Image: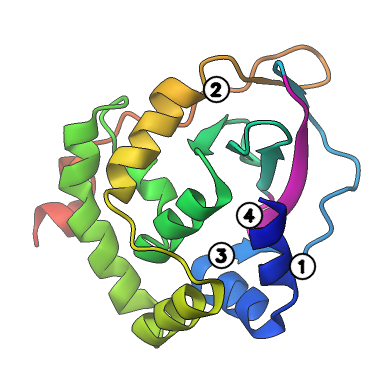
Amino acid sequence: MEETLRCITEQPHIVEILANSFGIEFSRPCDVHLWFRVQAEEKFSPFAGDGAGGVFLFGNASGLILYVTSEGQAGVVAASLTEFLQLVIAYPSWPDLLKFSGGGRLDEMERSASYIKQEGADDIANIEASRSTVVEGLSLPPALSPVSALHHAVAVLGQGVAVLAPDGWVCEGLFGSFVVENNRMWSTA
């Protein structure tokens, strides 16, 4: 984890691409007062954020990547920083894979994946060049199945991790109830 994180932060052009093209802000200060606490067997430390106020944390012992949204949802999204970056590079709008999961169904996530990938290609200028620059700059291996890995992380790897608000309220999980048909743009495509 530390080696990959150091490799990112030592390359300002990679930091900029990850923020501008993929929505992951490694330059945002993350050690400010967090509004939540993580209840787990290990300590989680913040390392990045997203433009909507979400925070990414890594498990100091396991390397698991935990995502806490600004809307009160949380869950483990990857087994490692490398796996998380592979997901982000493949699907810049990766949270939509969770939103359109039909309550956590892998088959529904896979159905939505092609629409989400196409949206990324349509919405992000020079997406292929950005992908290549990040993959080469960080020597990322090819992802075998980022959608399946995301599903496994949220459904299985995050079992022992809870995120609580100061009043003790437990954050909701990341799986949404929507399916492909709930997105009018996709259902007419």
- Give residue 163's quadrant in the image: top right
N-terminal label among 3 and 4: 3
Circle 3: element type: loop
Q: Residue at x 64, y 79 (%)?
A: 16
Which of the two marks, 3 or 4, is nearer to us in this view? 3
Mark carried by residue 27: 1
Magenta segment: 42-53
At label 4, which amino acid type do we have? Ala
Residue at the disc numbered 3? 23
Residue 86 lies in the magenta-colored region: no
Picture coordinates of residue 70, whole percent (x, y): 66, 41
Which of the two marks, 4 or 1, is nearer to us in this view? 1
Residue at the disc numbered 4? 52
Q: CA distance from mark 3 to mark 4?
A: 9 Å
N-terminal label among 2 and 4: 4
Crowd tier of the residue under label 4, counting other residues whose Cα lies within 10 Å: few below 14, some 14–19, many 20 or above: few
- For the residue pair 129 and 169, the one nearer the viewer reads as 129
Residue at the disc numbered 2? 172
Q: Residue at x 61, y 78 (%)?
A: 14
Q: Residue at x 57, y 50 (%)?
A: 81
Q: CA distance from mark 3 to mark 1?
A: 12 Å
